[in-house]
Image (cartoon, rainbow, N blue to C red):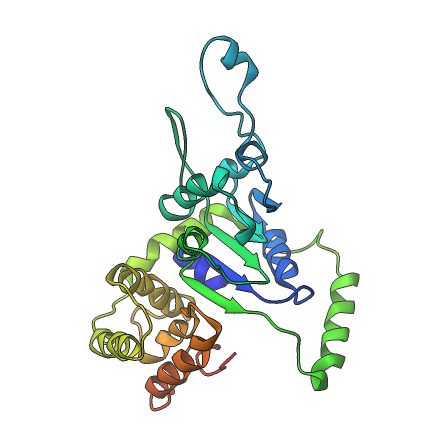
Amino acid sequence: MGICLTGRENLFLFGPPGTAKSAIVHELSNLLHGNTFEYLLTRFTEPNELFGPFDIRKLREGELITNTTGMLPEANLIFLDELLNANSAILNSLLMVLNEKVFRRGSETKSLPVLMTVGASNHLPEDEALQALFDRFLIRVHCDYVDPALLNNVLESGWSLEKKSMIDAPKISIEEITELQKMITSINLNDIRPKYIELIQKLRNAGVKVSDRRAVKLQRLISASALLCKREKAIISDMWILRYIWDTEEQREIIAGIVNAMLKDNEDSEAHPRAFINT
């Protein structure tokens, strides 16, 4: 989640109910000193529920202006639960929010201050319209129930969270996140680019669709990995993030195997903490 926030890319959480998908977003929201918009989508969700109603006063004057106060267009962090319940009435607007970070309604166009959008669902897309929505999420993370042997740890951690007061929680300003996002392009990728190209080709040869656009955008997350490790250069292990570009459940193991094979001979003390944790 920190990688996507730093890289200003969208994150999709996939898994059954009760696997803390919402909880982890709420924890991040509590740390950010900004506006969060959260909504549970249904097949009947209307545009007004996400973007706000038309301004009645402006409507009387013949102008179609949306009152976005407290709604999605003003949020720094957006969380759309049950994302794949989205219907045709909101689909086009959501696609523009996710891809261009712009809200457009009639003649009204507004650039959005969103730092990251997180979508969650307990199922994967089954039709082309929803596949287009899913494609706007560069990274996909599978959330599952923990191993029974680790249940005690989960109970202890959960109880600690229940007792924790968020009053004294550290706050990260929106300005700090924005500065981090600007620093992404300062990371030197030259040393890893040949290996990155090799990895992309191996994934494509295995039947994983990695478009040129997607390959370009993934460089932001490789850079984010290096930046969060306080490095000016990316190293091979920063490509760990490519484990999470699967489209189907069947691809998860295939992609992980290819990425891990690339990383295994490049263990480094400066690697990101998640580089060699295959989950």
Q: Position of residue 77 (x, y in %)?
A: 52, 48
Q: List x then y, in percent, for residue 26.
A: 63, 55
Residue at the limit of the structure toward the top, as seen here? 61
Q: Is residue 232 left or right of residue 37?
A: left
Where residue 87 appears, as percent x and y from the top left, is: 52, 44
Q: Residue furthest front?
A: 127
Picture coordinates of residue 254, whole percent (x, y):
40, 81
State the residue in front, 5 or 67: 67
Asked whether 109 or 155 is in front, the reply is: 109
- 36 to 185, vertically: above or below: above
| Residue at 45 percent of width and 49 percent of height | 115
Looking at the image, residue 109 sits to the left or right of residue 274; the answer is left
Front in this rendered view, residue 187 or 144:
144
Q: Residue at x 38, y 54 (%)?
A: 181
Find residue 27 and report its image quarter: bottom right
Please name whichever residue, 107 or 195, is drawn nearer the observer in this view of the structure.
107
> Vertical placement of 165 versus 279: above or below?
above
Q: Tell me if residue 270 can be seen.
A: no
Task: Look at the image and tell me whether residue 3 can be seen.
Answer: yes
Identify the residue shown where x is 61% and y is 73%.
Answer: 144
On screen, residue 16 above or below 181: below
